[in-house]
Image (cartoon, rainbow, N blue to C red):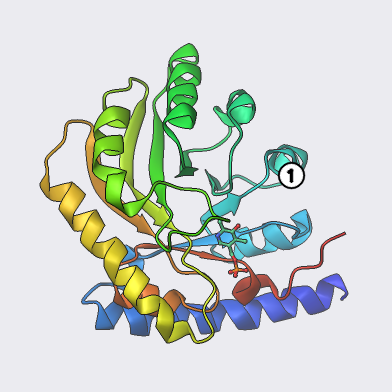
């Protein structure tokens, strides 16, 4: 597709998504501005991402370190989250480049983020990724032992636990994900009610292109959208 077509299609998608967010937020008793719309930008050209930012997108999410670093110089300023599986040896490459790492999926990774953050005299906000569908193919903490992991990670310096993130199993019908979102919301509230030092359950990041309205209805306040905003991804 030409850049003009991609931009037109983004504009159309974006205004529709904003309306949908408003509807779903209302159902959840929230205001649309309570919901963070994060653009998942993998494979999207910098020119299109910049257009999205100029149109009002305030958050972007990368899931590959290399892609994030490659595009960095071309992008206008935006709040960046890291949302993909992060190898411990790459933490040092992004520690000063993002404001939040949503995809913390092991104690080992949390420890490395802590170490690198301290080295740079900073504090990194993190979300803990939960493998909510208990899938072998996915990363993340298991539902059953999240709490003990939260306690251990909370004791590390240089990081702040700000909430939870999940990618539910691929379902035939989007309604099937509702039960996973509900489970996540329960966990989010449970952990918050424990009043653990250095743990603030502020953000629940769940919901992607096919199911973001359901996720918002069930308590998400960060949704991560790629396809719904930019169209089908083309991998080179
Ligand atoms: C790609 C990606 C998304 C967005 O997926 P879509 O289905 O295209 O909206 C969300 N979260 C993560 C972690 C991703 O890698």
The residue indicated by pointer 1 is 67
- Respond yes or no on whether mark 1 lies under 8 Å from ligand 1: no
Q: Residue at x 40, y 39 (%)?
A: 126
Q: Residues within 10 Å of mark 1 (few under 14, many from 20)?
A: few
| 197 with respect to 66 (left or right) | left
Q: Is residue 171 above or below residue 33?
A: below
Q: Residue at x 41, y 54 (%)?
A: 165
Q: Residue at x 84, y 70 (%)?
A: 3
| 230 with respect to 24 (left or right) | right
- Expressed as whole percent of the image width and height from the top left, the position of residue 43 reads 76, 58
Q: Is residue 21 visible?
A: no
Q: Is residue 53 visible?
A: yes
- Expressed as whole percent of the image width and height from the top left, the position of residue 195 reads 11, 40
Quadrant of the image containing the N terminus: bottom right
Q: Residue at x 36, y 70 (%)?
A: 180
Give 177 or 46, whichever is nearer the viewer.
Answer: 177
The quadrant of the picture showing ligand 1 is bottom right
Q: Secondary structure at mark 1?
A: helix
- Expressed as whole percent of the image width and height from the top left, the position of residue 86 reads 59, 38
- Expressed as whole percent of the image width and height from the top left, the position of residue 146 reads 30, 45
């Amino acid at each position: 597709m030409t850049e003009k077509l991609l931009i037109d299609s983004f504009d159309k998608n974006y205004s529709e998504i904003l309306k949908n967010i408003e509807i779903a937020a209302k159902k959840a008793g929230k205001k649309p501005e309570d919901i963070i719309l994060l653009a998942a930008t993998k494979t999207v050209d910098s020119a299109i991402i910049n257009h999205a930012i100029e149109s009002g997108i305030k958050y972007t999410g990368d899931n590959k370190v290399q892609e994030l670093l490659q595009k960095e110089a071309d992008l206008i300023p935006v709040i960046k989250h890291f949302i993909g599986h992060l190898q411990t040896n790459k933490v040092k490459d992004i520690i000063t480049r993002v404001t939040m790492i949503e995809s913390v999926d092991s104690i080992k990774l949390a420890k490395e983020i802590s170490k690198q953050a301290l080295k740079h005299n900073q504090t990194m906000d993190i979300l803990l990724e939960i493998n909510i569908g208990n899938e072998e193919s996915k990363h993340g903490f298991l539902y059953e032992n999240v709490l003990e992991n939260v306690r251990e990670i909370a004791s590390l310096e240089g990081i702040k636990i700000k909430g939870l993130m999940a990618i539910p199993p691929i379902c035939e019908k989007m309604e099937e994900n509702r039960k996973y979102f509900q489970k996540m919301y329960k966990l989010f509230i449970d952990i918050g009610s424990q009043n653990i030092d250095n743990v603030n359950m502020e953000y629940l990041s769940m919901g992607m292109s096919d199911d973001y309205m359901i996720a918002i209805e069930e308590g998400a306040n960060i949704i991560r959208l790629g396809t719904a905003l930019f169209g089908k991804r083309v991998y080179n």
